[in-house]
Image (cartoon, coloured by chain):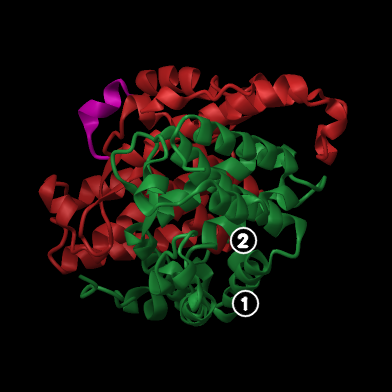
Chain colours: A red, B green
Amino acid sequence: MKMFWPPVFTGVTSSHQPCEQTDQQERGRSLAVTMERLEKQVQFVIEIDKLKQVVRQTLLTDASRLENSAEHSWHIAAMAILLHEYAAERDIDVFRVVKMLLIHDLVEIDAGDTYCYDIEGHADKAQREQAAADRIFNILPADQAVELRALWDEFERGQTPESRFAAALDRLQPLIHNYTTGGKMWQHHGVKKDLVVARNRHMELGAPTLWKYAAKLIDDAVAGNMLWE
Amino acid sequence: MKMFWPPVFTGVTSSHQPCEQTDQQERGRSLAVTMERLEKQVQFVIEIDKLKQVVRQTLLTDASRLENSAEHSWHIAAMAILLHEYAAERDIDVFRVVKMLLIHDLVEIDAGDTYCYDIEGHADKAQREQAAADRIFNILPADQAVELRALWDEFERGQTPESRFAAALDRLQPLIHNYTTGGKMWQHHGVKKDLVVARNRHMELGAPTLWKYAAKLIDDAVAGNMLWE
């Protein structure tokens, strides 16, 4: 379906003069250079559309279908805006958290989603995702490729307050979905309480109050026979 | 499926003492008050999950299915991070653009998506969406309800550089999708070039270079028989 891409911008790149430029931020850059840069950015915009096809092991809250990684990324980016008051450290850069969350799953376009309770899948996860990051971010102009890769690396390493808070949201959201759908996916995958706690307790580092909340959800899920002890 | 909600946090709200709090930002607030606030925020997080069910009249770039408004919101929020250099005015608050884009379609949970070329649907669109905003944002604690409503109002009014740039991205993304899918949805709805130009040319106010790019896409679409003259 990409047969129409890329369009040939001969009209824009050759016959128009730079004096036609109106963007304040484009001053000093020729229109041909701008359009070459913009082509790469649009190519990336088209590439990341594929994230809408990566299916996760989380049901929507009405249990009607599994969610995809683009929707998930939107959901937790919005959660960052709503819940940053619970971050472990005061005065974190919430915009950097949002940027990380918007791009944190892009590597799944090549590497697929690895279910957080899939021990086997995690064996080569890092390797698959590094290769994906190498390819995908480099579709962008070099300066942006470096910027987004640094954000993704920061999220993966989890060494900053922002990345730890982002990781907490990345775990809290599916936990809420599992709870509201009566634990269907936990039961489907035979996941038990100990594993859920082990995989989620790092939330405490990024957002202690949210972990307290999550731990209570887990206890309630066990009490309500949604999650096996 | 919401039968398990809300969980009863008796353990957290009554037996634990405030001295157990660890969040720096939670100092001075009792845990019971914090949990009451967090309950409202989580209720909102669950409510907005419904945006994943609102189907738009835009195909994914591989034309495999229509996209939904949550995916769309994610896509254009990422575009804001990538393309803000093309905003009409220098030094816009990109984070505010991203926040607007993440929440701009939430009213569709009640009001549905109104196709941008649906003249009839636009007659009562504003009224339907105002009512939706009144309900949905007020699920949040009052301070956040006010904050998000102000962001949504700003986007709707389009009177700030940030809202005009946000609106430009909201239009560029489906245009790119229409182009990469050979104009299938334009043809399906019998939409012609004049209407596409009329509905999209306000992009020029928020991002002149992106409108130049979009105008060329439209011309190429006509030349390639994807869009009727």
Foreground residue among A224 and B134 = B134
Query: As displayed, is residue B135 above or below residue A150?
Result: below
Q: Is residue A211 within the magenta segment?
A: no
Q: Nearer the viewer, residue B167 or A22?
A: A22
In the picture, which quadrant includes the N terminus of chain A? top left
Q: Answer left or right for B45 relative to A180.
A: right
Residue A124 painted magenta? yes
Q: Quadrant of residue B207?
A: top right
Q: Position of residue B40 (x, y in %)?
A: 45, 75
In this picture, which residue range is highlighted in magenta? A116-125
Q: Quadrant of residue B184?
A: top left
**Which amino acid is tagged 2?**
Gln
Magenta segment's dominant SS is: helix
Up/down of B58 relative to B114, above or below: above
Q: Name the spot of residue A135 as percent of width and height, x first.
A: 47, 18
Q: Residues within 10 Å of mark 2 (few under 14, many from 20)?
A: some
- Quadrant of image for the C terminus of chain A: bottom left
The residue wearing badge 1 is B146
Residue A69 percent across, percent down from the top left: 36, 43
Please give the label number shown on residue B24.
Answer: 2
Left or right: A189 in relation to B192: left
